[in-house]
Every structure is written in structure tokens, then in C-alpha cells.
Image: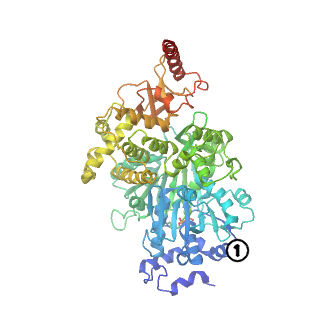
């Protein structure tokens, strides 16, 4: 029997959201959509929605959860007629943008009007028009700060909850608090491979709908011995598949943009040499890629070299995005080197860094599954079976357990969660991490000694940047350099704008050095920004000549505008120091210290090495720094741990007494552990104290 839920839209020729006739494209896509497994569950889903406030949905990646289910709910709840919205959260920006675009096309409406997306610094929706919005989880959490009951929404869909990002975990906790106070609200918790037991227990009494995927068997092939270099091994495997295996696209998982671009270049080069084989077309996919370039993953494979010959082969070289967030059809071969980039936080030294880490067994299964979507596939694991069994953890630990919670705790305070320690986390963070966050917020002046949110803390939470950066902006007003700090903070909020193509590294480094400043890298960023703005009329050419990423620079300008708006809302004057004024260098340094006083290093006199204050951890300046000399004291933006530890984006602190002035609580001698910094301060104390006493006596 034909499913009545499938039929009804075919009869109507008019799009209820635009009043226009449906285009041909609409019906073409509709046919494909109706094949998706989730369509068979439309009736069950809508019934669950009617009878429950919270419903859980588990379905294989590619079954149509993200693109279809929100549309079902739009039909049912008709938010457009009720002045409400439906929001669907995504942990990844790329997914939010890409899926919103796809769904607008499927619904035959204008992208950015009826259907749009919101990600940090980028709101692609229309007021009073958008009724279906894809949003990053972080942005919805931010909305909750201003509207704790999320009253705009009649339905909230939390997608990719298995990813267990910090923001999604907190949203789940918040939603549990909101539900009794919003009986009209409907919530759907969606996920690929869910830790079903845990979720059912957390959302007690909620129905679970399981959509079985249409998957084909995937043969798993392990490396016989450990690979010395997984990138080399990956390239080798791609070429072997291309030469020996039947037609079918390849999906290769790597860890980040640079690695991916590099491998794509190498594959292109090798592919071009293999004239006796079909065309090999590498396509990169990572989150900072512009949306139109992301869409390339959905294009058809290359045509045969000659009619009658086999078709070419796509090789999608992707980060974890392709693991669950975006479904790419036609993948038959998956290459899994077993690594991904993960945020790791060490609460002891308060340092957070992105590190290449082994994936979990659950991730490995999910990656392999990408190969069996359209026909039986193969997954090449570039590690041994033994390694899989003994070295990979079962599940990736949730972000909550491996991240700096400062931002999150500040947000929870702002939302008004009364007792954070009693907040119903799915898995509560380690007490040490929680205590650290509270302590840091107290040092920053965001929480007072009673643990209450201060006016400063409230203001800080309004900025869509980390508390440190917010603090820097707010204090720049005192130091009369708001304009400069806005530019620097914007530059710190974009992806790395400096391009360094493999064959032009020297030229690129020279171009960067042209912006150098004696004070250091934050000043260099300011120079880059200012010069970019002066050359904006010819931005593309200028960026090319200076090895800068034009997209990143353009987004710095957009971000700056938004931050400036917030500063103005708080009635801060957009003050500006002239580089000729003697306060220029000092005041910018002081502003930086006001937010980053916990990210300061000084040289140990006996070893000559930098040590991070308090932990005395030894670090080097990152190779990219423009500092020619080694100032005794520096403030830094980022800690990077590879084979050695280094600090990136570093600026001199001309006078270390500023630390005592600006962050007296943190640099209190009574609590400052032994180390290079303490030695300086003690010396300071002994050299100055007697003098001060003497002076007194003279008076
Ligand atoms: P799920 O969320 O269950 O993983 P999705 O709803 O994301 O599944 O995807 C369902 C189907 O829609 C997939 O087969 C995918 O290939 C297709 N699809 C999604 N986005 C696009 C796009 N931009 N272009 C073409 N097909 C797409
Ligand atoms: Mg999805």
C-alpha cells in the first residue's frame, strides 16, 4: 500500500511557503528523497511528536535524518503560520551551512529566507521570514543566554548528539530544565550511532525510533605491520585502489586543512602522470572551505578519458566531517589512517591544544560504514588489527571531559543556571576542570569571591568570543586603544590567514615578515589588518601578493564590525591611539595582559629557555614568530604541542610590573610557585621594599 504521507505533496502543484508553482527540480529531488529510509518512518515520527515532548531518533548516516525530518516537522507544526521557528543544531559550521542550502533547494524556497543558517559571526536568516533554521549548537546555546526558555522555537532538533560536543551536551541539560516550563515545546534528539542506553536513561520516558540503514557489507582490510608515515601510506593506498579496483569513489580521512591540501596536490600530480588509467580527481573537504567549494563533493565523478572507457574516480580527502555530518553518495572505498585532530585540555597547566590523536573504535566503525552506502565496499585501515583491538578506545570521550570549561561555565551563569555543580550533565566534567574554570573566571573578574556573576562577567559573556578576548576588548577602553584591539581580536578570531604554499615557503615567509613589529606578533596582526583595509579596493590581488587568505581577511572585517557593534552597545568610545604616541606599544600590551595574564612566559636566566608562569613548563617560541630578539617576558595566544611544546602569536611584555598591576590576585607572591617568574618578583620585592622604607623614614 502506498504510504499516504508520501503522496500528498505530489498532488499539489503549489508551494505553500512561497505561493509559487513548484519547479521541475523540486519533483526531481522529491523522488530521490522519498527513497530515503527515514521516509518510511514519517508517520511514526509525527505520532511521537504529537504525543511526547521529547523523542529520540537513531538512524544510520545517510538515512535522511538531517535533511528530511525537519521538513516533516515543518509540515506538521506549520511554524510559518504561527510566528515560530524550528531549529536544528549541528556541531559543525560546515554541516549547518551545507545542509541548510540543500534543504532550501529541496523545499524549493530561497536560501536565506524561509530556510537559513546561523553560525558564529554569520547569520544567514531573514527576520520574520525564516521558519527553519540550521544552527551550530554553540549559537543556540548563545541564544539561550538572552532567551533562556528559547521561546522563538516551537521545536528544537538536536542533531549529531552522539558527537557529544560540549555545547550539545549543555543544550541537552538545558532542555531538560526548559521542558516542564514550555509544555508546547517539542524536542527531537537525533543521532547516528547512539549510546542508546545512556540517552534513554537521560531522557526518561521518551520514545525511541530506530531507522535501520540500507547498508551493504564492507570488507575490512588491516595493514600487516604498523605504518611509519600514515600520509605516505594513504597516498600509496589511493593509487593502488585506482590501479587495481573496480570503479567507485574513494573517501580518505585525514586530520586537517594543511595535510588535506598537501595530499590533494600530490594526488593530482600523481594522477596526471597515470595517463593509462582513468582520471583521478581529488576533492578536499574541511570546515574552513568556502561553501561553494564544499559542494564539489556532491559532483559527478570525472568522465571517461575516451567514450567506452571506464569513468574517472573521485577521491574525497576529508576531515572527520565526512564521518557523520555530511553524507557523500557513491563512496565504495574508505581509507582510514586512524587519526583525527582533537581538542585536549590539561587543567593543571590550563592549556588547551588541538592534537592529532588516535580515533576510537566507534569512529573506525562509522568511517568504514561510509563505504557501504550504495553497494558492497572496502575499508582500508592503515593500522594493524592488533592496534585496533588494543590501542583504540571504545568510544571517543565527550568534549566536556577534555575541554576548557571557562566559556561554558560563564554561559551557564549568564543563562541563570543557579547551581552549576547540580546541573544535570549527561556526564559531569571532572571536578578539577570545573574548579579550574571557576578559578579562572574569578581571576578574570567575571565571578566575585562569592561565586556570583559580576557586571564585568555579564558583559564578557555578551561577546561571541572566548572570555580572554572579551576581557581584552573591554579593558582596551581604559587604555584608549579600542580600535586597535578590535582589529587584533578579529584577526585572532579567524582561521590562520597566512598561506604558505609548499613550493613558495620562502616568498611567503618574506611577505609575512614585511608586516613584522618589534613588539611581536599581535602587532604584526594589527599591521596586516590595517594594510589590508587600506588595500581593500584591490583585495584579491593584494592578498595574493602578500600570501594572505582573502576569505579569512574578509571575515576579519566582518567580525570586527560585529564586535564594534557590541562595544558601541555598551557605550564604549571607539578610541584609537596613534602609533606615534608613546603609549601606543605599552597600552596595547597592557590590554593584552588584562585578558591573557595566565598565558605569560618568561625566560629562565640559567637555562635561557621560556617557562610558562606557574607551571614552569618549558616552551619555545613558535617558528612563525616575528620577534627577532627574545624578550624576557612575553604574552602568548596559543600553546602548541607537537614533538616539542611551543607558543604561537607572541608579544613582548616591556615591563613585567604590569602583571602585578593588572592581575595582582594571580601574581600574588604568596601563591606563586617557585620558578623563574617568582625569582624576578622576589628580586623586585627585595630591591624595592627597603628603598620604600628608607624614603618613608626620610619623610
Ligand atoms: P543523515 O542526516 O541521516 O546522515 P542526510 O539527511 O544528511 O542524512 O542525507 C540524506 C541524503 O541526502 C544523503 O544520501 C545525501 O547524499 C543527500 N544529500 C545531502 N546533502 C546533499 C547535497 N548538498 N547535494 C546532494 N545530495 C545531498
Ligand atoms: Mg545528519
Say which of 517 and 225 sits in front: 517
Task: Look at the image and tell me whether residue 641 can be seen.
Answer: no
Task: Look at the image and tell me whether residue 666 can be seen.
Answer: yes
Q: Residue at x 38, y 50 (%)?
A: 556
Relative height, residue 32 to residue 472 (above, below):
below
Q: Residue at x 55, y 66 (%)?
A: 87
Mark 1 lies on residue: 51
Q: Is residue 305 left or right of residue 341?
A: left
**Residue 457, position as x, y percentages in the image:** 55, 46
Colour basis: rainbow
Ligand 1 within 8 Å, label 1 CB = no
Of the 4 image quadrants, the one containing the N terminus is bottom right
Which image quadrant is residue 175 in? bottom right
- Residue at the far front in the pictured view: 699
Say which of 289 and 429 sits in front: 429
Q: Quadrant of ligand 2?
A: bottom right
Q: Secondary structure at mark 1?
A: helix
**Residue 552, position as x, y percentages in the image:** 37, 50
- Residue at the far bottom in the pictured view: 11
Say which of 505 and 144 sits in front: 144
Relative height, residue 345 to residue 116 (above, below):
above
Q: Is residue 230 left or right of residue 556?
A: right
Q: How many marks?
A: 1
**Residue 526, position as x, y percentages in the image:** 35, 41
**Residue 3, position as x, y percentages in the image:** 61, 82
Mark 1: few/some/many CA within 10 Å (<14, 14-19, 20+): few
Q: Is residue 699 left or right of residue 153?
A: left
Q: Residue at x 43, y 34 (%)?
A: 590
Say which of 427 and 664 sits in front: 664
Amino acid at each position: 500500500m502506498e504510504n499516504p504521507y508520501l503522496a500528498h505533496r505530489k498532488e499539489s502543484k503549489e508551494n505553500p511557503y512561497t505561493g509559487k508553482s513548484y519547479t521541475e527540480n523540486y519533483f526531481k529531488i522529491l523522488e530521490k528523497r522519498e527513497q530515503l529510509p527515514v521516509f518510511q518512518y514519517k508517520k511514526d515520527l509525527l505520532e511521537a511528536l504529537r504525543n511526547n515532548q521529547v523523542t529520540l531518533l537513531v538512524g544510520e548516516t545517510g538515512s535522511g535524518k538531517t535533511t528530511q525530518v525537519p521538513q516533516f516537522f515543518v509540515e506538521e507544526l506549520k511554524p510559518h503560520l504561527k510566528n515560530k521557528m524550528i531549529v536544528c543544531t549541528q556541531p559543525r559550521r560546515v554541516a549547518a551551512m551545507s545542509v541548510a542550502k540543500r534543504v532550501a533547494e529541496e523545499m524549493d524556497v530561497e536560501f536565506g529566507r524561509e530556510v537559513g543558517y546561523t553560525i558564529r559571526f554569520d547569520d544567514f536568516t531573514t527576520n520574520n521570514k525564516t521558519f527553519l533554521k540550521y544552527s551550530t549548537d554553540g549559537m543556540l546555546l548563545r541564544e539561550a543566554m538572552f532567551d533562556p526558555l528559547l521561546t522563538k522555537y516551537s521545536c528544537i532538533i538536536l542533531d549529531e548528539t552522539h558527537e557529544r560536543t560540549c555545547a550539545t551536551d549543555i543544550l541537552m541539560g538545558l532542555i531538560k530544565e526548559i521542558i516542564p516550563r514550555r509544555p508546547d515545546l517539542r524536542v527531537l534528539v537525533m543521532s547516528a550511532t547512539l549510546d542508546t542506553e545512556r540517552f534513554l536513561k537521560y531522557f526518561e520516558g521518551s520514545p525511541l525510533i530506530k531507522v535501520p540503514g540500507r547498508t551493504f557489507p564492507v570488507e575490512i582490510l588491516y595493514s600487516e605491520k604498523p605504518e611509519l608515515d600514515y600520509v605516505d601510506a594513504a597516498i600509496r593506498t589511493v593509487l593502488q585502489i585506482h590501479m587495481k579496483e573496480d570503479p567507485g569513489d574513494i573517501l580518505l580521512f585525514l586530520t586537517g586543512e594543511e595535510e588535506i591540501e598537501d595530499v590533494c596536490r600530490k594526488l593530482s600530480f600523481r594522477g596526471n602522470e597515470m595517463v593509462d588509467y582513468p582520471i583521478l580527481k581529488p576533492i578536499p573537504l574541511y570546515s574552513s572551505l568556502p561553501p561553494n567549494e564544499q559542494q564539489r563533493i556532491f559532483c559527478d565523478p570525472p568522465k571517461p578519458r575516451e567514450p567506452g572507457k571506464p569513468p574517472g574516480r573521485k577521491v574525497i580527502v576529508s576531515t572527520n566531517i565526512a564521518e557523520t555530518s555530511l553524507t557523500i553518495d557513491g563512496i565504495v572505498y574508505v581509507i582510514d589512517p586512524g587519526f583525527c585532530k582533537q581538542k585536549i585540555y590539561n587543567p593543571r597547566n590550563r592549556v588547551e591544544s588541538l592534537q592529532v590523536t588516535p580515533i576510537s573504535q566507534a569512529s573506525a566503525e562509522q568511517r568504514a560504514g561510509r563505504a557501504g552506502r550504495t553497494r558492497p565496499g572496502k575499508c582500508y585501515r592503515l593500522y594493524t588489527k592488533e592496534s585496533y583491538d588494543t590501542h583504540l578506545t571504545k568510544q571517543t570521550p565527550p568534549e566536556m571531559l577534555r575541554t576548557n570549561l571557562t566559556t561554558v561555565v560563564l554561559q551557564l551563569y549568564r543563562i541563570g543556571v543557579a547551581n552549576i555543580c547540580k546541573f544535570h550533565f549527561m556526564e559531569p566534567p571532572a571536578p578539577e576542570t570545573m574548579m579550574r574554570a571557576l578559578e579562572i573566571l574569578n581571576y578574570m573578574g567575571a565571578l566575585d569571591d562569592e561565586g556570583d556573576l559580576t557586571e564585568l562577567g555579564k558583559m564578557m559573556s555578551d561577546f561571541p568570543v572566548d572570555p580572554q578576548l572579551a576581557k581584552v576588548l573591554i579593558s582596551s577602553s581604559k587604555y584608549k586603544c579600542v580600535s586597535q584591539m578590535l582589529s587584533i581580536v578579529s584577526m585572532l578570531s579567524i582561521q590562520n590567514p597566512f598561506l604558505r604554499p609548499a613550493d613558495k615557503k620562502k616568498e611567503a615567509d618574506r611577505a609575512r615578515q614585511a608586516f613584522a613589529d618589534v613588539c611581536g606578533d599581535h602587532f604584526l596582526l594589527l599591521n596586516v589588518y590595517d594594510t589590508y583595509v587600506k588595500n581593500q579596493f584591490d583585495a584579491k590581488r593584494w592578498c595574493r601578493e602578500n600570501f594572505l587568505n582573502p576569505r579569512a581577511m574578509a571575515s576579519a572585517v566582518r567580525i570586527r564590525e560585529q564586535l564594534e557593534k557590541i562595544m558601541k552597545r555598551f557605550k564604549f568610545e571607539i578610541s584609537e591611539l596613534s602609533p606615534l604616541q608613546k603609549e601606543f606599544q605599552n597600552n596595547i600590551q597592557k590590554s593584552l595582559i588584562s585578558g591573557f595574564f595566565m598565558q605569560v612566559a618568561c625566560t629562565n636566566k640559567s637555562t635561557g629557555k621560556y617557562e610558562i608562569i606557574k607551571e614552569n613548563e618549558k616552551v619555545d617560541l613558535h617558528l612563525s614568530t616575528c620577534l627577532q630578539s627574545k624578550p624576557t617576558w612575553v604574552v602568548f595566544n596559543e600553546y602548541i604541542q607537537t614533538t616539542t611544546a611551543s607558543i604561537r602569536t607572541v608579544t613582548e611584555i616591556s615591563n613585567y610590573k604590569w602583571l602585578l598591576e593588572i592581575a595582582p590576585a594571580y601574581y600574588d607572591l604568596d601563591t606563586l610557585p617557585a620558578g623563574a617568574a617568582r625569582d624576578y618578583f622576589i628580586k623586585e620585592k627585595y630591591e624595592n621594599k627597603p628603598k620604600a622604607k628608607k624614603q618613608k623614614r626620610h619623610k
